[in-house]
Amino acid sequence: MSARFEELAWRETPIGEISLRRRLDPRLGVDIYEVKINDEFLMSSLFTVAEIELARLGLAALPADARPEVVVGGLGLGYTARAVLEDSRVSSLLVVDAVAEVISWHERGLLPEAGALVSDPRSRLIEGDFFAMAAGPGGFDPAAPGRRFDAILLDVDHSPRHVLAPANAALYTADGMRRLTAHLRPGGVFALWSDDPPDAEFEAVLAEVFASSSARVVSFPNPLTGGESANTVYVAT
């Protein structure tokens, strides 16, 4: 049996102290991997349904015969990125994360199933500021400035209203969304994970910029409460 608690990695970063830890939950009998920034919990392997649905719902909005080139903003524990690669249509995946340490967790194999993401020839992990890249003309691929993609999937902030850094808020405005669409091909898809219920104000921003958009509530069992919890996935085409 594994130890009850282990801090696998810790690093001081520009956004605070980021740590990866593993703990054994005695009630569930499973290892849970958690990411914290300072004293705030950022993500947990106990709640991954909506992160996976971010990939599935975003890619489902593309034509069935597409061979999509995809960007994922935010690597985290890797669930969204791995779900992208599970779609056999995907021809390439670029994962952008601002924290080199998070990329290192996967490259060092500190997380379960990390090898599937690192070793897949379709996948590249890039250290960079997703929000600055989205706002600039160069875009997300340092090796191919101006490259456009079929899908951009984002899971960094808690929600459009609850951001990890003040500068991130500019993305969730109409001007920010217009700058992001410059990195999408015609008919391309933007999808966003949010920890909050559907936000009418942000839905109006999406409706102003995109041809079509929707907010999907993704419910999942919460073993800590014995009830259900929910996240929101926005999909805009």
Image (spheres, rainbow, N blue to C red):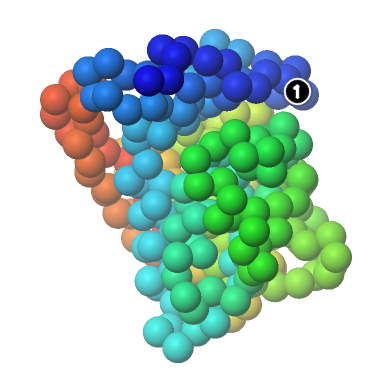
**In the displayed structure image, the side of residue 49 where residue 93 appears, left or right:** right
Residue sticking out furthest to the bottom? 65
Quarter assignment of residue 98: top right
Front in this rendered view, residue 148 or 125: 125
Measured from the top left, where is residue 99 in percent x and y? 72, 35
Residue at x 62%, y 63% (from the top left corner): 120
Quarter assignment of residue 95: bottom right
Q: Is residue 67 visible?
A: yes
Answer above or below: position of 224 versus 135: above
Give the position of the N terminus as an image quadrant.
Answer: top left
Residue at x 77%, y 24% (from the top left corner): 14
Residue at x 48%, y 22% (from the top left corner): 22
Would you name the residue on which mark 1 appears?
Answer: 13
Measured from the top left, where is residue 190 in percent x and y? 51, 62
Answer above or below: position of 170 versus 92: above
Answer above or below: position of 45 versus 27: below
Helix, strand or loop at mark 1: strand
Measured from the top left, where is residue 39 in percent x and y? 54, 11
Q: Is residue 209 visible?
A: no
Residue sticking out furthest to the front? 1
Measured from the top left, where is residue 3 in percent x and y? 44, 14
**In the displayed structure image, the side of residue 164 where residue 14 appears, left or right:** right
Q: At label 1, which amino acid type do we have?
A: Thr
